[in-house]
Amino acid sequence: MLKIVLIVGVLLFNLVGVQAHEKEMGTLDNLVKKFEANPADPQTTIQLLRELKNQGKPNRDVVNRYFQTQKEADYLKDYNWSIIRDYVDDVNAPQIKYLFKNQSKFMQNFSKDDVFQKLDNVFVGHLEQYYNSNKIEYNKYLDFLKSSGYEHYDVVADYFYIKQL
């Protein structure tokens, strides 16, 4: 009897898990359809990016497609800043280059700490890939940050200095 109860319990558990997975996939499919119909809609884009992140799926294509519908000057809008802040991590992305070039404009609209935290994280992430494998590229990029006058250069450099200790 106990064996039957366990088997029924396992079957019910699996059935609930399958239904939850189907619901997640249905939500993602619906968001993808909404996004495909209007890739310029920031609300749909943010919902889709959030769902992709929750499911551990890549988001680069969605981010790229969305920002193809935006003007650079619009990167300063609240909804675009939230996408840049939360989902753009490539140091070579146009949004990060624009952010770097226009730090003061972003700081007028958003927290100085948020702007520096975003840039610091992107720079550390970029340098991390070279830290152990390509010291020439690592040092070249650190020199670029220093010569650019980046105000938080020391924060980025200190991250790796502390890592060496």
Image (spheres, rainbow, N blue to C red):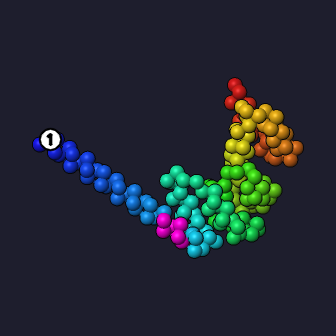
Q: How many marks?
A: 1
Q: Nearer the viewer, residue 8 or 54?
A: 8
Q: Quadrant of the N terminus?
A: top left
86 sits to left or right of 138: left
Q: Locate residue 130, reporting x and y percent.
A: 74, 37
Which residue position is annotated with label 1? 2
For label 1, the crowd category at 10 Å Cα-Cα, with few meaning under 14, some 14 to 19 and many 20 or more, is: few
- Does the rendering let one see residue 164? yes
Label the magenta part by its dominant secondary structure.
Answer: helix
- Residue at left offset 58%, top offset 70%: 36
State the extent of the magenta-drawn residues as a range.
29-34
Q: Is residue 99 magenta?
A: no
35 sits to left or right of 103: left
Q: Residue furthest bottom?
A: 37
Reply above or below: 36 against 122.
below
Amino acid at the residue labelled 1: Leu
Reply above or below: 138 against 122.
above
Reply above or below: 35 against 5.
below
Q: Secondary structure at mark 1?
A: helix
- Residue at left offset 23%, top offset 48%: 9
156 sits to left or right of 146: left
